[in-house]
Structures are given as structure tokens and as C-alpha cells.
């Protein structure tokens, strides 16, 4: 299955809301491990974007 950025964000959002990985996997039609990987990819991607866009303070 091809996953999209929206899937990564959805997995991350559900986890932030307190949903366990097993349940997230069921909701998304994947394994808990895949759901965890999707959320990690989202977090990594958004952290990288924030670092690039961070303006220098000093």
C-alpha cells in the first residue's frame, strides 16, 4: 500500500489523542508497527521543515 503524508499525519494525530498503536493500525488498515512508522515519519518531516524555516534569533 502506498502511504501519503495525510496518513502519516492521521497516525500521529490519533497517537497524540491517546489512541494506542494497535487501535491506530486497525483504524488505518495496517499493523501497529506500520502505524508507528507513519507517525514517526510525520514527526521527522515536520521537525525537518521547522528546522529549515526557523529564523535565526541572534
Image: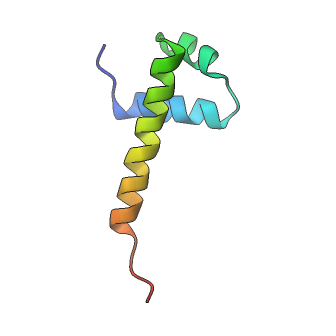
Residue 3 spot, x, y in % from top left: 33, 23
Number of labels in the image equals 0
* Residue pictured at 36% horizontal, 56% vertical: 49
Residue 11 spot, x, y in % from top left: 52, 29
Identify the colour scheme used: rainbow
* Residue pictured at 68% horizontal, 34% vertical: 17
Residue at the right extreme, as displayed: 18
Say above or below: 53 vs 33. Answer: below
Position of the C terminus by quadrant = bottom left
* Residue pictured at 40% horizontal, 32% vertical: 6
Say above or below: 21 vs 41. Answer: above
Query: Could you tell whether 41 is left or right of 18 in the image?
Result: left
Residue at the front extreme, as displayed: 33
Residue 4 spot, x, y in % from top left: 33, 28
Residue 24 lies in what quarter of the image?
Answer: top right
Position of the N terminus by quadrant = top left
Amino acid at each position: 500500500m502506498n502511504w501519503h503524508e495525510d496518513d502519516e499525519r492521521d497516525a500521529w494525530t490519533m497517537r497524540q489523542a491517546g489512541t494506542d498503536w494497535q487501535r491506530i493500525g486497525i483504524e488505518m488498515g495496517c499493523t501497529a508497527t506500520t502505524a508507528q512508522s507513519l507517525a514517526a515519519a510525520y514527526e521527522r518531516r515536520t521537525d525537518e521543515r521547522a528546522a529549515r524555516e526557523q529564523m535565526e534569533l541572534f
